[in-house]
Amino acid sequence: MVALFRDKSIITVFYLVILSVAVHTHLFFTTPVMVTSDQDGIFSLLLRTYLTGMGSTVLFILYQAIILVQAIRLNGVMMELRMFPSSNYTTAMAYILLTGLMPQWCGISPALLANFLLIWIFIKLSRLYNHPSPKTLLFNTGLIVGLSVLFYHPTAILIVVVLFALAVVRPFKLAEWLILLMGILVPYYFLASGLFLKDRLAGFTNYLPYLKWNLPLDHWNLPLILNLSVLTILLLVGLYYWQLSNKRMVIQIRKNWGVMMVMLLILLPIPFIFLHAGIESAIMCLIPMAAFDGNLFSNPRKMYLPNILCILSFIMIIYNNWSLIKN
């Protein structure tokens, strides 16, 4: 099965659609869950305003479209940056598979929408190396990050991502760091100005992320442990094959992978440090995880291990679908 996605052709996109439908078979029997909160940003407000009352068919198509667009866009970025030795759709395949490995990720949420912004930010960061006009690029990147925080508060951790990425990609220049920080603060400057003019400045804190250590799940059970184990195995094996090929890459590609690694490590604690984020916020980690897992499905010459891990993933996905349909 993995071999179907190691080729880059139009027919492979059709296979991705089939894969996404198969991974989320439960949507034929249940309505996609819409996860929102009053305290996590504008995305929740938009979802409640425009999707409440929508039919299950519309939500099904919308969810599948979001997953497929994100998977194909992420895969396209990886190919454009030549981060794999050959062109393929394994990153898109990995992203779709990963979305089915946790029941909490099988719904439309602000965190899922935030993945569009996360991909956009990675594209900006990948252009920093040897860019002829980095100040404009840095300001635009900071602006996107600042807007991301307004739209979904847990994306505030992306501030740490872009700062570390800047340190990885470029030599230290104080002016560049200040420009990046200015871009991040500009959306909040205009927000504060608008609230001040409307005499509502006291409500400014409602637009700020609330940090608090918490456990995203009340209890652990065997299916949860197995799902997390499969996610961990896929990631570790993907990292192993990435490390094998990383030595043969040119410095710019290695720096892009360094940015992806920074993104992975910093995004992992999101469910634990943002109040009301929940385990569904961890879907943001799938962007870097799918990138590294793409190495697992594309780099090995022999297909035994990739196929075994793909089958293992599908076993857990089938169980998750059955649980969602039963409940």
Image (cartoon, rainbow, N blue to C red):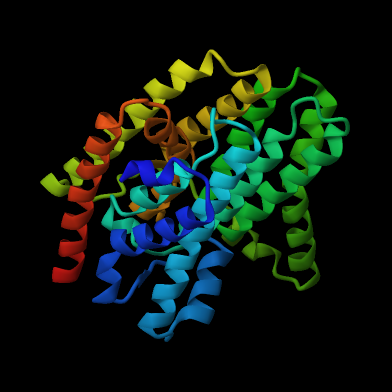
Vertical placement of residue 254 versus 27, above or below? above
* Residue at 19% from the left image edge and 56% from the top image edge: 318
* Residue at 41% from the left image edge and 53% from the top image edge: 277
Residue 283 in the image, given as x and y percentages of width and height: 41, 50
Q: Quadrant of the C terminus?
A: bottom left
* Of 148 and 257, the residue lying toward us: 257
* Of 194 and 310, the residue lying toward us: 310
Quick one: which residue is furthest to the right in this view?
133
* Residue at 64% from the left image edge and 48% from the top image edge: 120
Q: Name the side, left or right, on which 100 lies relative to 68.
A: left
Q: Can residue 29 be seen by looking at this rendering?
A: yes
Question: Would you identify the image quadrant in which residue 54 lies?
Answer: bottom left
* Of 237 and 307, the residue lying toward us: 307
Residue 148 in the image, given as x and y percentages of width and height: 62, 53
Residue 293 in the image, given as x and y percentages of width and height: 40, 35
* Residue at 36% from the left image edge and 41% from the top image edge: 3
Q: Can residue 110 be seen by looking at this rendering?
A: no
Residue 74 in the image, given as x and y percentages of width and height: 55, 47
Q: How many marks?
A: 0
* Of 126 and 39, the residue lying toward us: 126
Question: Would you identify the image quadrant in which residue 233 lies?
Answer: top left
Q: Name the side, left or right, on which 53 lies relative to 29.
A: right
